[in-house]
Amino acid sequence: MALVAALATGCGDGGDSDSDSDSDDQPEQDRPVVALTEDQISEAVLQDDNLGEGWTATPSSDDDSVVPGCFGDIDTLTEGLAEEAKGGTEFGYGEAELPFVESSVTAYEDETAIAAVFEQVKTVLASCSTIADTDEDGIVWDLAMTYDDAATHDDVDDQFRASASGTLTQPGQDPTEIHIEWTSVRLGPNVGTVATIDTQERPTEHATWSGIAFERLVDVAEGEEPEETTAPAPAVAS
């Protein structure tokens, strides 16, 4: 998925300077979270140092391909929402570039709208147990889905985690085992997402990577310097 929170800026009839002063004196923790800028987003997503050695990083790219099942339904829900800024980084580990991890943040223009859509996405995922379909590229998806909206990340307004395991089959090829972990949080008008894809399950590593990413998001939104944290290298399959 990937709502600008309106700041109260005193709209008196005479430009009363006391109103501006009161706003400036408002405690930082009581001020509403506003849409992050592109520069702030670039700091809020996972950094090279957070993943450590052995990873290759590239900027995230837009993908307009249509995916099947409830993933496609979610794309439909988010279409048309006005964005203020967005950015992200994709990471691949080792020569095979697996696991693949993407950390992204999208800042929306209307917080009320994205809050409603975020809830709708959760509803779709909660009712989605399987994806069994063929997409526009002829790839056959056969995945079992699980969903959890437990509050595992602090200081955010909403969150969920979804997992998918099964196979993807390219045309003319044998099925490939695939495991997807996807966690999203909403902080004001900003949505942060971390997705992990691999041919083996990565729930523990994904939890670590998403935890670091969302702590960065909260720190940047609050005007603080994110902590320098480096995750352990991913375990190698035996």
Image (tube, rainbow, N blue to C red):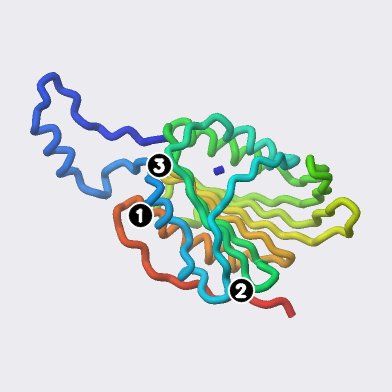
Task: Give the number of the mark in front: 3 or 2.
Answer: 2
Residue on which disc 2 sits: 234
Of label 3 and label 2, which has the lower sequence position? 3
Pick whichever, 15 or 19, lies toward us.
15
Q: Is residue 42 above or below residue 8?
A: below
Q: Residue at x 46, y 70 (%)?
A: 49
Dot 2 falls on a residue whose secondary structure is: loop
Q: Position of residue 174 (x, y in %)?
A: 89, 59
| Quadrant in which the N terminus is drawn | top right
What is the three-letter code of the residue carrying label 3?
Gly
Q: CA distance from mark 2 to mark 1?
A: 26 Å
What is the three-letter code of the residue carrying label 1?
Val
Q: Position of residue 137 (x, y in %)?
A: 79, 44
Q: CA distance from mark 3 to mark 2?
A: 32 Å
Q: Position of residue 18 (x, y in %)?
A: 9, 33
Pick whichever, 69 or 42, lies toward us.
42
Dot 1 falls on a residue whose secondary structure is: helix
| Quadrant in which the C terminus is drawn | bottom right
Q: Residue at x 61, y 53 (%)?
A: 182
Q: Which mark is residue 73?
A: none
What is the three-letter code of the residue carrying label 2?
Pro
Residue on which disc 3 sits: 188
